[in-house]
Image (cartoon, grey):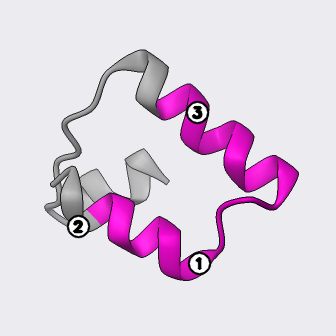
Amino acid sequence: MLTFLEINGIEIKCTDDELINLGLGIADGSINSKDLLGWIIDHS
């Protein structure tokens, strides 16, 4: 995801812990696509 966004001119600013929590949330289903979009917007 980060590579795709970077190629398209979007730089994400987050800590390693934030990124790990995002990945775990996606994996366990607690983060849906709407939440992911919000996270990307908040961190770009």
Tags 2 and 3 in contact by the CB under 8 Å rule? no
Q: Is residue 9 left or right of residue 18?
A: left
- Whole-angstrom CA distance, mark 3 to mark 1, is 15 Å
- Residue 37 to residue 29: above or below: below
Under mark 1, the amino acid is Ser
- Which residue is most to the bottom? 34
Q: Quadrant of the C terminus?
A: bottom left
Residue for badge 1 = 33
The magenta segment: 19-40
- Residue 7 to residue 18: above or below: below
- Which residue is most to the front? 30
Q: Position of residue 24 (x, y in %)?
A: 72, 38
Q: Position of residue 18 (x, y in %)?
A: 43, 30
Residue for badge 2 = 41
User: Sequence order check: which comes first, mark 3 or mark 1?
Assistant: 3
Residue for badge 3 = 21
- Which residue is most to the right? 28
Query: Residue at position x 17%, y 59% from top?
Result: 10
Q: Is residue 20 left or right of residue 5?
A: right
User: Sequence order check: which comes first, mark 2 or mark 3?
Assistant: 3
